[in-house]
Amino acid sequence: MNVTCVRVDLAQRAQHRLGLPLVEDFVHPEEFGTYRDLKRDFPDLRFAAGEQQSTIWDFRRLIHESRVDVLQPDLSRCGGMTVAAQLAAEPGTADREIVTHSWLTDLLHAYSLHYLATLPAATWVEFNVAQSRLSRGVARDHLSLSADGTVSVPDGPGIGVDVDEDFVRSRQLNEVDW
């Protein structure tokens, strides 16, 4: 058993013991065959991947070649709403969950929440509750989890949050004509 399989075996045991819903993105993003092999060897383990993918072709490989259970597009990396919409319509996606990778700022959280709201069965959102001043300061409006663990889709103009231009300007490296 190779090192990756040993790690997966340990992850599977931890998943069952702790009731974790999935194992996320622990294989190099270009190792599509590794996920396929691990899914074969550990059929009860739910694998999530995609946060580092940048094209619809990469996601097609995750669906059809790697056979991951949960797809995790990062809308700031994958081609935005265009690729995300293509992913939602991709054959083979219907029997998989889509959970956006939205770790950095409330701008990305808001963008991701709007996308997830368009899906017929979105049940999860990746939401960073331990943000730094840098990642939290980009938006004036701050999103937060409710007591029941949900987060509301912002309903203001645009994506529902405003950029704090003064905050961004105070941290820019080069002068920009605003």
Image: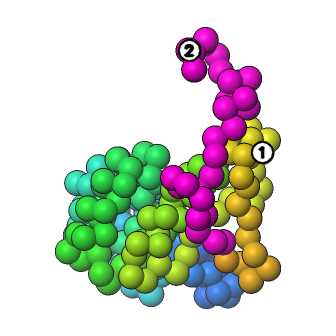
Q: Amino acid at mark 1?
A: Ser
Q: Residue at x 29, y 75 (%)?
A: 93
Q: Residues in magenta?
A: 151-178
Q: Is residue 96 visible?
A: yes
Query: Magenta includes 86?
Result: no
Judging by the rendered image, the residue that carries numbered circle 1 is 132
Q: Amino acid at mark 2?
A: Asp
Q: Residue at x 51, y 60 (%)?
A: 112
In this view, the residue in front, 150 or 153, is 153
* Residue 98: percent from left, percent from top: 42, 71
- The quadrant the N terminus occupies is bottom left
- The quadrant the C terminus occupies is top right
Against 35, is 15 above or below?
Answer: below
Dot 1 lies on which element?
loop
* Residue 75: percent from left, percent from top: 44, 52
Q: Residue at x 29, y 49 (%)?
A: 55
Identify the main secondary structure in magenta.
Answer: loop
In this view, the residue in front, 107 or 15, is 107
Judging by the rendered image, the residue that carries numbered circle 2 is 177
* Residue 96: percent from left, percent from top: 36, 79
